[in-house]
């Protein structure tokens, strides 16, 4: 197993443990010693290889599918995962509610959570755009184009959702299956 993959796997293991509010010692305590803190810690640091069997058992312990423990095998793109998308709230406010209602509610909720009421712009993550695309029943690229048409996004933001041709093809296949 490559060092990068071991570290990525360890980061996934740590993220799942943290999401469950467990410390390494908490894992050992909750498992009644089945999972030693030092062993789980070495998996998380990528210092120790974990067998498929042990990974499966750890997934059962955490109550998640094994696939949730595995890192994405595709090369990551730091640009797409950290790209901030800036929505023009003034343009959004001038759109008919029947078209932009879901986006307006989404933006309003984020503003309330952040206590950010400047009313001019709002930055969201590329992952937020993927969620919005589901709401609009579009691919992320289709939604991006629509937002540019509406003046909510600046031109030149195409491809910000981080999708690739495989993702777009899978998206289309999923939508076609759902429409049957």
Image (cartoon, rainbow, N blue to C red):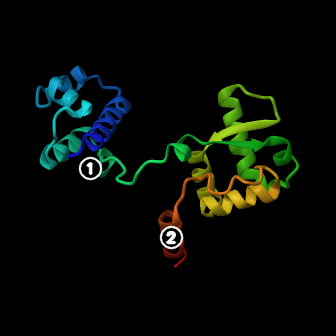
Q: Residue furthest bottom?
A: 180
Q: Residue at x 44, y 48 (%)?
A: 76
Circle 2: is it few (<14), some (14-19), or many (20+) Cα within 10 Å?
few
Circle 2 residue:
169
Which residue is drawn at the image coordinates 26% and 32% (left, top)? 44
Task: Determine whether 71 is above or below 31 in the image.
Answer: below
Q: Residue at x 55, y 44 (%)?
A: 79
Residue 119 screen position, x and y as percent: 82, 34
Foreground pick, 144 / 96: 144
| Rendering coords of residue 110 (x, y %) | 67, 36
Seen as rendered, the residue at the extreme top is: 25
Q: Secondary structure at mark 2?
A: helix
- Image spot of residue 5 (x, y percent): 28, 44
On residue 66, the disc is 1
Quadrant for residue 118, please give it: top right
- Left or right: residue 81 versus residue 138 is left
Quote the CA–CA distance across marks 1 and 2. 25 Å
Quick check: 124 left or right of 24?
right
Upstream in the sequence, badge 1 or badge 2? 1
User: How many residues crowd mark 1 within 10 Å: few (<14), some (14–19), many (20+)?
Assistant: some
Name the one closer to the observer, 160 or 180.
160
Q: Position of residue 124 (x, y in %)?
A: 65, 40
- In the figure, residue 88 lies in which quadrant? top right
Q: Is residue 27 above or below residue 100?
A: above
């Amino acid at each position: 197993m490559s060092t990068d993959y071991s570290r990525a796997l360890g980061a996934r293991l740590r993220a799942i443990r943290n999401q469950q509010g467990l410390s390494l010692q908490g894992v050992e305590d909750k498992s009644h010693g089945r999972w030693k803190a030092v062993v789980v810690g070495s998996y998380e640091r990528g210092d120790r290889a974990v067998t498929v069997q042990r990974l499966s058992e750890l997934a059962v312990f955490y109550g998640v599918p094994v696939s949730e423990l595995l890192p994405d095998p595709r090369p990551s793109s730091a640009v797409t995962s950290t790209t901030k998308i800036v929505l023009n709230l003034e343009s959004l406010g001038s759109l008919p509610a029947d078209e932009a209602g879901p986006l307006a509610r989404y933006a309003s909720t984020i503003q309330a959570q952040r206590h950010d009421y400047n009313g001019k712009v709002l930055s969201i993550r590329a992952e937020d755009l993927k969620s919005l695309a589901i709401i609009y029943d579009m691919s992320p690229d289709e939604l991006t184009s629509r937002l540019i048409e509406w003046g909510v996004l600046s031109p030149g933001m195409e491809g910000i959702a981080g999708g690739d041709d495989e993702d777009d093809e899978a998206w289309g296949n999923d939508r076609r299956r759902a429409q049957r």
